[in-house]
Image (spheres, rainbow, N blue to C red):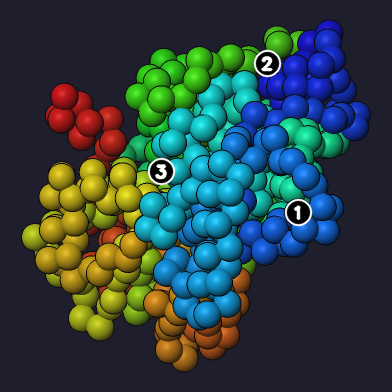
Amino acid sequence: MEQTIAEKILARHAGKAHVNAGDIVVADVDFAMVHDARAPNTIRMVDKMGAPRLPFASKTAWVLDHYSPPPNLEAAQTHTAMRRFADEHGSVLYDIGDGICHQVMPEGGHLTCGDLIVGTDTHSTTYGAFNAFGTGIEGTDVTAVMATGKVWLRVPESVRVQINGRLQPGVWAKDITLHMLGRFGAEGLNYRAIEYTGSAVSAMEIDDRMTLSNHAAELGAKAALLEADEKTLAWLAAHGAKPPRAVSADAGARYVECIEIDANQLAPQVARKDAVDDIVSAQDVRGQKIHFALIGTCTNGRLDDIRQAAAILKGKRLAKGVRMIVTPASRQIYLAALREGLIESLTAAGASFEAAGCGTCVGITNHLIPGDREVVISSANRNFKGRLGNHDAEIWLGSAATVAASALTGFITDPRTVAGGQWEAAHEEAAHV
């Protein structure tokens, strides 16, 4: 029976020959993750269950990234409890500054093609970039996973998104995801597994593919999967992943919907204030003044994102009155950017760097609080009112290139209209070989 990637992975992990969309399965988990915003519930449930043994705890990562560094005593105590738990149960621990959960999980070699990965965050869909079924669960569910190594899931319907052509220089995966949000709306693909395919996807580097899968969470997706290719396998091997079990969809697999996007026609996109699905082209709002710029987060804090910004800002200065914060997605990314001179270029331009973490994105650490009626342009995945601690400020979303171009001019700017804004990842990487 022909199956989608999602159906094949869940069937294999449920010990079945095949499954259908809508089936309830109990599936073996390959690896689990819990971050500090959900850790208290996980630990409380361990005590409540009174589980004498947690045999799957050694295949669970505890990540201190949301309250990083801790802004109050309660957060600090949570971190202390997480460190103690990881030490007692043999779990993997990523401490403050190591990075954001969705970056350190693949960087740490904890997943590979064909895996089933669960984590206490909706953006666990990120792992689909590596041909794995990654999905979000609650902290209490992770307790059950640590005790049994299993999770129950409803097999999602699958949507096939074929992205044809080629993204033009200065246009990135972020622009595809924003385009899709404008087309389908927030939660428009709720509890569906997205399969991304097409020539534009094949041409993407891993950093952009991770953005594609990560941002699917705003569409409500249960998972967002790509097929594996040589780039996937090389990246996983370089990060110590176990041998891959690549999964491809069958030719006759059934999809609830098939969508085509022409990448050639796509321009840089932005999400307007307070809504992730109020999408327009950057050119259409080029007169919009901005005061603060944020590059980073689990969506766009990778090395290519920092390269995009540096290509635009090297040797220049931020517009008068504009502030910029950059939060690399991991310590490894920060060090790589340091070796390439990107940190120096952006710092000289007027940007400030934060330790790798989620705190700035979600407003937990209070390191980026805009004033009343100030406008933030951010590469994050969400722009809800008050997300950065001020309901009277605005948050707009765009690619790292769009954020950097806007910080340079002081107004929302199509990156293709400024010097360096048409930088291409493949060309730059080829130059480093």
Q: Secondary structure at mark 3?
A: loop
State the image coordinates of residue 22 (x, y, percent, origin top left): 90, 32
- Residue 149 is situated, as x and y percent measured from the top left of the image, at 74, 33
Q: Tell me: 204 left or right of 157.
A: left
Would you call the spot at circle 2 few (<14 residues within 10 Å), some (14-19), or many (20 or more)? some
At label 3, the amino acid type is Trp
Which sits earlier in the primary sequence, circle 3 or circle 2? 3
Which residue is depicted at the point 64% across and 59% down?
Answer: 39
Pointer 1: what residue? 46
Query: Considering depth in this image, is 178 or 391 the residue closer to the camera?
Result: 391
**Local SS, label 1:** helix
**Label 2: element kind:** loop
Label at residue 249: 2
Residue 103's place in the image compared with 246, above or below, is below
Choose mark 3 or mark 2, whichever is in front: 2
Q: Residue at x 53, y 64 (%)?
A: 79
Mark 1 vs 3, N-terminal side: 1
Q: Amino acid at mark 2?
A: Ala
Quarter-of-image position of residue 249: top right
Closer to the camera, 415 or 97? Answer: 97
- Cα–Cα span, label 2 and label 1: 38 Å
Question: Is the C-beta separation of discs 3 and 2 under 8 Å?
Answer: no
Quadrant of the frame with the N terminus: top right
Q: Say which mark, if any, is on residue 172.
A: 3
